[in-house]
Image (tube, rainbow, N blue to C red):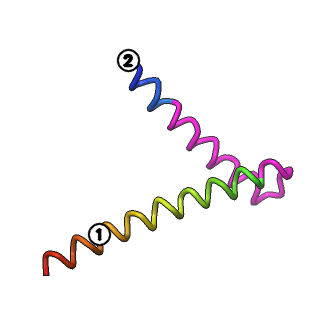
Amino acid sequence: MTMLVLLSCVVLLALAGCVCVVWAARGGPRWVRAVATATLAAGEMVRRSGRTGRKQGSDSDG
C-alpha cells in the first residue's frame, strides 16, 4: 500500500512539473519558471543516464 502511495506522489510531481513547463512557456510567474527549469533539468539528467547505460551495454555486446 505504501508503494502505491509513493508511486502516486511521484506521478503527481511529474504531472505538476509538466504543467509548470507549459505554463512557463506561456509566460507564467517566476516560481513557475523555476519549477519548469528544475523539471527540464531533471528530465535531461534522466535522459543522459539512460544513454550512457545503453552505450555501455552495446559496447560490451560488440
> Mark 1, residues whose alpha carbon is within 10 Å: few (<14), some, or many (≥20)?
few
Quarter location, residue 55: bottom left
Q: Residue at 71% of width from left, 50% of height from top?
A: 35
Q: Within the magenta stretch, is there residue 6?
A: no
Q: What x and y, as percent, mark residue 8?
A: 48, 30
Q: Is residue 11 left or right of residue 1?
A: right
Q: Residue at 83% of width from left, 52% of height from top?
A: 28
How far is disc 1 from disc 2 in space, using C-alphas? 33 Å
Q: Is residue 6 left or right of residue 32?
A: left
Quarter location, residue 41: bottom right
Closer to the chain start, of discs 1 and 2, is 2
Q: Residue furthest right?
A: 29
Q: Is residue 62 left or right of residue 49?
A: left
Q: Secondary structure at mark 1?
A: helix
In the picture of the structure, the residue carrying the numbered disc 2 is 1
In the picture of the structure, the residue carrying the numbered disc 1 is 54
> Mark 2, residues whose alpha carbon is within 10 Å: few (<14), some, or many (≥20)?
few
Give the amino acid at mark 1: Arg
The residues colored magenta run 9-32
Q: Nearer the viewer, residue 49 or 18?
A: 49
Q: What x and y, as percent, mark residue 24?
A: 76, 55
Q: What x and y, as percent, mark residue 31?
A: 81, 48
Q: Residue at 45% of width from left, 64% of height from top?
A: 47
Q: Are marks 1 and 2 in contact (CB under 8 Å)?
A: no
Q: Within the magenta stretch, is there residue 16?
A: yes
Magenta part, dominant SS? helix
Q: What x and y, as percent, mark residue 30?
A: 85, 52
Q: Is residue 2 left or right of residue 15?
A: left
Q: Secondary structure at mark 2?
A: loop
